[in-house]
Image (cartoon, grey):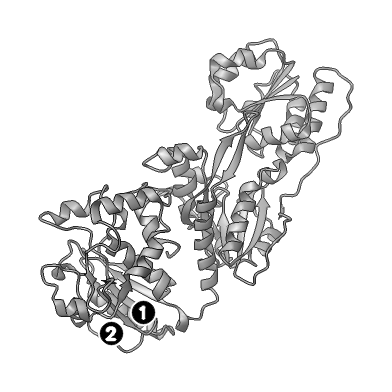
């Protein structure tokens, strides 16, 4: 019996699939007190670690002090001499064992078992050499060719070799459900991307990436004030496609649900902070680790979150095929607090003039700006005020009844019913049943219509961000992380995506109030206010 302890769960999955006589465990999940029972009855121990000796120093010391042969290896593709010299078997045996694991897959893990059994334990099974496995390839699956934008899904070769691809298939199905075509591709690393891999990825209109950052062979050397060339994502940038990070968390789904921060420090670093160095667009978690009946960790997808990732990716991919004159863009102006005098509030930025200049630049690049927006900043602000402005103290009945941008209550209710129950319960505790009373006009429709402070012209809408602060102390309420969005707030953002059909929303001015809505700090769920408001529109 050989005990394989690896911080790479895909090693363990491949070893199980090989059918060889391994006992399997991940050192990160093994308490030191449980180690004697785990080792008992085994003849040899293989330890493969990510992070060097310090990643599991006490466990290593206990094993190396025992009577069994121990093979100590790095979890990286390249051997680690410092770890390997800790092994109590000959260096050549340790080096060959690393080769089996670096190539990976059930076949190589089966041969690793026989190799160590014969060379160290002196059995006579017979074994083959380490077999090279493709560094990249395309996952074969029954695809739905619906003619939509092609979305590449990039995942680790280790998952492919271990058969841990159910989460990839789930995302591919979600992409197809959202009207796209899926191109699942596995690779060993993005830091040494093969030309053929880049050519294949170049076919895609957008990429959802689940592997770690591409920049730099030694990312630790890239930092503020350091060598700017140490972080190089040129190969991916040259593809000229949107690259989105699909979050595959190292925790179980239940832990993520309970976590107000959303992500663990490790996932925050590897799934958000570092990918942003690559220029990736961060989406939401769609896959979680789950311990199966053998105590091994597998990736399990969340179908609803997979649909969110897919929807964002398909929209980005489709935008490449929309001519500038057909693109619909919303310019959302901050208003903090919600006063006419604070529309477009910013520090060091003339928001009205900037919006006018932006619109002129867009017109010059072929966007349909129409002819109904003022060409001067002050006039634009007064036009927004005349459209309602959302300043309750100054809003007139004529402005409310005359505004043309309206959302029927029935339409809002139909969308609102799709939100998670816990979110709806919180909203209704504060704002009553939909459509609420805030900026609702029943002069045209007795069922009510939600009115927005917005100006439409051509394929552009300029609007004031929905208010969040009310009452005697609107500033305090504005920053209250427990106050759910109002019906008016959600309706405004839903109207942009579902009725106006915005391809992009550009927030202009001081920071807005989306980040103050209740929900997780990162890695949002469907019950988080910002996720409910934005939907797939980014």
**Residues at circles 1 and 2 in contact by the CB criterion of under 8 Å:** yes
- The earlier-in-sequence mark between 1 and 2 is 2
Circle 1 residue: 460
* Residue drawn at point x = 79 percent, y = 28 percent: 20
Write down the quadrant of residue 345 in the picture: bottom left
* Residue drawn at point x = 69 percent, y = 46 percent: 160
| Residue 538 visible | yes
Give residue 492's position: percent from left, percent from top: 32, 67
452 vs 112, left or right, is left
382 vs 117, left or right, is left
Mark 1 element type: strand
Crowding at label 1, few (<14), some or many (≥20) Cα neighbours within 10 Å? Answer: many
Circle 2 residue: 373
Front residue (pair 132, 385): 385
Front residue (pair 417, 24): 417
| Residue 506 visible | no
Q: Is residue 107 positioned above or below 336 on the image? A: above
349 vs 196, left or right, is left
Front residue (pair 194, 371): 371
Q: Residue furthest front?
A: 446
Quadrant in which the C terminus is drawn: bottom left
Front residue (pair 363, 78): 363
Q: Is residue 515 positioned above or below 377 on the image? A: above
Marks 1 and 2, how far apart at CA: 9 Å
Q: Residue furthest bottom?
A: 371
Q: Is residue 385 positioned above or below 154 on the image? A: below
Quadrant in which the N terminus is drawn: top right
Crowding at label 2, few (<14), some or many (≥20) Cα neighbours within 10 Å? Answer: many
Give residue 359's position: percent from left, percent from top: 33, 80
Mark 2 element type: loop
Give residue 255's position: percent from left, percent from top: 45, 36
* Residue drawn at point x = 30 percent, y = 69 percent: 332
């Amino acid at each position: 019996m050989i005990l394989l302890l690896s911080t790479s769960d895909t090693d363990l999955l491949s070893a199980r699939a090989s059918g060889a006589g391994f006992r399997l465990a991940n050192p990160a999940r093994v308490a030191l007190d449980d180690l004697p029972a785990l080792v008992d009855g085994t003849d040899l121990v293989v330890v493969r670690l990510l992070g060097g000796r310090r990643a599991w120093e006490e466990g290593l010391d206990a094993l190396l002090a025992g009577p069994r042969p121990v093979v100590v290896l790095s979890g990286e593709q390249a051997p680690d001499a410092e770890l390997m010299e800790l092994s109590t078997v000959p260096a050549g045996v340790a080096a060959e064992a690393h080769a089996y694991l670096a190539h990976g897959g059930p076949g190589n893990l089966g041969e690793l078992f026989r190799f160590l059994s014969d060379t160290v334990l002196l059995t006579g099974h017979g074994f083959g050499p380490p077999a090279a496995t493709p560094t990249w390839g395309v996952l074969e699956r029954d695809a739905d060719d619906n003619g939509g934008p092609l979305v590449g899904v990039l995942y680790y070769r280790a998952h492919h070799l271990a058969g841990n691809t159910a989460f990839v298939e789930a995302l591919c199905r979600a992409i197809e459900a959202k009207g796209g075509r899926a191109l699942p591709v596995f690779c060993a690393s993005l830091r040494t991307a093969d030309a053929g891999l880049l050519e294949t990825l170049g076919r895609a209109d957008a990429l959802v990436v689940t592997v770690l950052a591409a920049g730099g062979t030694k990312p630790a050397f890239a930092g503020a004030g350091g060598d700017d060339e140490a972080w190089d994502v040129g190969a991916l940038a040259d593809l000229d496609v949107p690259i989105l990070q699909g979050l595959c968390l190292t925790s179980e789904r239940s832990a993520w649900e309970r976590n107000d921060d959303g992500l663990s420090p490790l996932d925050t670093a590897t799934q958000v902070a570092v990918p942003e160095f690559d220029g990736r667009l961060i989406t939401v978690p769609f896959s979680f680790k789950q311990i199966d009946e053998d105590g091994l960790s597998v990736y399990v997808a969340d179908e609803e979150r997979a649909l969110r990732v897919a929807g964002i990716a398909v929209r980005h991919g489709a935008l490449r095929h929309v001519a500038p004159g057909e693109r619909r863009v919303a310019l959302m102006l901050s208003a903090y607090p919600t006063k006419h005098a604070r529309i477009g509030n910013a520090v060091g930025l003339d928001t009205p003039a900037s919006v006018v200049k932006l619109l002129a630049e867009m017109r010059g690049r072929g966007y349909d700006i129409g002819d109904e927006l003022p060409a001067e900043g002050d006039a634009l602000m007064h036009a927004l005020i005349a459209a309602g402005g959302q300043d309750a103290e100054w809003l007139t009945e004529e402005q409310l009844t005359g505004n043309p941008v309206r959302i029927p209550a029935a339409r809002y209710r139909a969308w609102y019913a799709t939100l998670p129950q816990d979110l709806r319960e919180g909203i209704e505790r504060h704002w009553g049943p939909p459509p609420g009373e805030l900026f609702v006009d029943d002069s045209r429709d007795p069922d009510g219509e939600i009115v927005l402070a917005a100006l439409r012209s051509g394929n552009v809408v300029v609007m004031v961000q929905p208010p969040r602060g009310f009452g005697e102390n609107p500033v305090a309420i504005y920053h209250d992380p427990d106050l759910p969005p109002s019906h008016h707030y959600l309706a405004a953002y839903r109207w942009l995506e579902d009725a106006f059909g915005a391809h992009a929303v550009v927030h202009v001015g001081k920071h807005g109030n989306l980040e103050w809505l209740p929900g997780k700090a990162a890695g949002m769920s469907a019950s988080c206010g910002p996720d409910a408001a934005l939907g797939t529109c980014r």
